[in-house]
Image: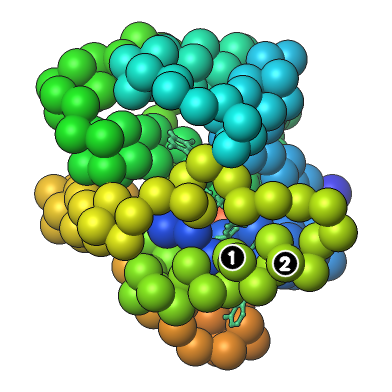
Amino acid sequence: MKPRRPLFVSFEGGEGAGKTTQIRLLAERLRALGFAVTETREPGGGALGLPIRGLLLDAKTRGLDPMAELLLIEAQRAQHVRDVIRPALAAGHVVLTDRYVDSTAAYQGGGRRLDARLVRSLNRLATDGVMPDLTLLLDVPVERGLERARARTARTAGEKEGRFEAEALAFHRRVRREFHRLARTEPRRFRVVRADRTIDAVAAEVAAIVEPRVTREARRSTPRRRP
Ligand code: Z5A
């Protein structure tokens, strides 16, 4: 295994943008190069991830107050950082997370119109300052992404459309606008990747962005030989 410094990469974007697909491909590629990789997601990672994911995504959870939704997301995040992200970074892994703080800004801030400053401060509290080094925003027009997500849901036996998929187009457009705004606000952290292309084309661009960063970190952690 190569000596390395950790790198924390988040994947963001709307429904059906291809985050899960791209994380899987990138993780395979990095592992083949000899890097230790931790794949995780929100909601889902950590001890509270799955139960809270069930509550948030199930269309049967009707009438969930937006503030309750926000607090559930931040609760699972605090545990996710403690259980998964911090230990993986401490072990020198490349951590790839499917959604993180920017999803909260986009969905609960942009989509649900909760106060942006409140979302930012809860994000800060929950992450305890553990922020991604790099964020890839996979950007796809809302209709195209929803089409993909719904086609996948229809293929998956027994799965019904989830709470977020069922939201109006206007909601998803606000989410996408907010992602774009965040990317403009933090151009050093964000890279916007056009995701309305083939899986291979997107994967090639993702690799071209992430691999040099991972390799650079590995070189910086290699002790120099004395002459
Ligand atoms: N949420 C929130 O509100 N606030 C928060 O802070 C956080 C989350 C952290 C998580 O659900 C939900 O939680 C999310 C917001 C909310 N909303 N929803 N729904 P999720 O994890 O189930 O949903 P998702 O993150 O949007 O995942 P997704 O719909 O599965 O999208 P994806 O991961 O970006 O895409 P994918 O699974 O890789 O691909 C979807 C389908 O498209 C699949 O059949 C692929 O084979 C296909 N695909 C992928 N790429 C392509 C390309 N390039 N061309 C053609 N087809 C493709």
Q: Mark 2: few, some, or many residues within 10 Å (few <14, many ≥20)?
A: few
Three-letter amino acid code at disc 1? Ala
Residue under the image location 73 percent in, 15 percent down? 47
**5 left or right, relative to 128:** right
Residue 21 versus residue 134: which sits nearer the camera?
A: 21
Q: Where residue 149 is drawn, which disc sits there?
A: 1
On the question of residue 209 being in view, the answer is: no
Measured in 3D between alpha carbons, the distance from the residue under mark 2 to the one under mark 1, in whole angstroms, is 9 Å
Residue under the image location 67 percent in, 15 percent down? 48
Question: Does the residue tagged 1 have its C-beta within 8 Å of any atom of ligand 1?
Answer: yes
- Measured from the top left, where is residue 144 in percent x and y? 44, 78
- Measured from the top left, where is residue 13 in percent x and y? 42, 57
Residue 130 versus residue 225: which sits nearer the camera?
A: 130
Q: Total number of numbered labels?
A: 2
Three-letter amino acid code at disc 2? Ala
Residue 102 versus residue 140: which sits nearer the camera?
A: 140
Q: Where residue 40 is drawn, which disc sits there?
A: none
- Please tell me whether mark 2 sits on a helix, a strand or a loop: helix
- Please tell me whether mark 1 sits on a helix, a strand or a loop: helix
Would you name the residue on which mark 2 appears? Answer: 154
